[in-house]
Image: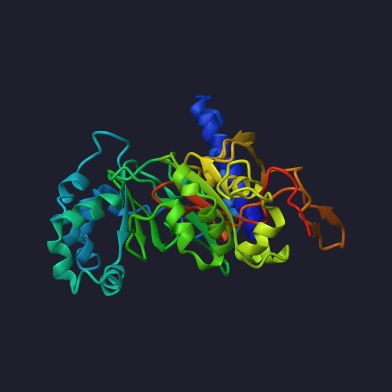
Amino acid sequence: MRNKQNKLVLMKFRWREKQLFDNRKPLITRFLVHWIILTVFISSCESEPYGSNWDEEDSLSISQYLEKNRDEYSKFYKILHEGKMLNTLYAYNPYGDDYTLFLPTNEAIDQFIQQNQLYGNFEELITDTGFINILTRYHTVNRKLHTDEFPDGALIDTTLTGDRLVTGFYSDGNNQLIKVNNSASIVKSNLKMTNGFIHVISGVLQKTEVSGYDWLQQQEGYSILAEAVRLSGIQSRLWWTKYTILAEHDSIYRRYGIHNVEDLKARIATPGMSLSNRNNAFHLFAAYHFVGGEYYLNDFNWGNKKYTTLAGRSLAIDIGVEIKINQGIDNYGYRVSNTGDSTLIDYISPVWENSNIMTTTGAIHSISDLMFYEPFPRK
């Protein structure tokens, strides 16, 4: 719970910082906001593994650093060379505020090859120049970013392929860890170069190639919602190129005595009406989980705002110290404090460890309870 609260507090200050920056507040205000964020982040754990690395290497460009440490990062250095990116990372960014390189270790590249059936060895990988060109640019963000600027969500700045990367914060004992794209941990951070930052990562970042709809259909743990979405004919109505899915795990349905989609139909479907009929409550329930637009958790606007769903009914999300979805629609249980006091929970929350899931069409967030625009029918 403490780690979750720390995440929310940090996000609160980051959203506030973004608003202040967008409004061009005076320099002293920016300084104070940065100081507050740093103080909150450091106090959230006993040790801070993500401090800046200021040494003689900050006089080198990104490519020069890789040349100097070629033995340690020989494989990605070769990949950058074959991908025609070394010259780019020698220089300043003519189209932005320098670069950020997420640098996989040699071990990370070996693991990628072992898990990829297309390449039998490193030599086969680097001969695939089309893939290498994309891979190198996907690991390069079009602005220099210190870890202090990372959100619990998607980076605002895109890679050189035009994609957004996702960063998330996790605890491992007393250490605060950062993962990129929910997969690769940062093992060495904030290496400051003359033209940006390098963050060394434990895995190779891969572009997602699955849509939100298809991701849902492939997940065994979300089978009830996935089947409801399929039976409702939602796919034929998805004219949005970008959308966000809020999804309940099957275990949430089981708390309500719903063990399969037949149970869900019996509980909510309008009798005598096709499941794909847009007026059927079953269809409306499934469609209500699709929000128009791409929203990672850090993309939702500060304060209380309503968002458009495929059901045509609005979804309310209140961003503050906590993220509250559809507050006041229903009662979802009680929270008991250490002193034994209980507090009514009248809102749904994202399940942090299963949120900010990347797809080609937008983010997917797991949520803590059954979501509908009116109280969900009990037995």
Coordinates of residue 169 in the picture (x, y in percent):
52, 57
Q: Quadrant of the C terminus?
A: bottom right
173 over 212 or under it: above or below: below
Q: Which residue ends up furthest to the front in the rendered image?
A: 272
Q: Quadrant of residue 172?
A: bottom right
Q: Is residue 333 left or right of residue 304?
A: right
Coordinates of residue 310 in the picture (x, y in percent):
55, 40
Coordinates of residue 116 in the picture (x, y in percent):
27, 70
Q: Is residue 74 left or right of residue 14?
A: left
Coordinates of residue 207 in the picture (x, y in percent):
33, 55
Residue at (69% x, 53% y) in the render: 268
Q: Is residue 67 visible?
A: no
372 over 293 or under it: above or below: below
Front residue of 278/271: it is 271
Number of numbered discs overlaid on the protein picture: 0
Q: Quadrant of residue 258?
A: bottom right
Asked which colour scheme the image uses, the reply is: rainbow
Q: Quadrant of the N terminus?
A: bottom right
Q: Is residue 139 visible?
A: yes
Front residue of 334/379: it is 379
366 over 122 or under it: above or below: above
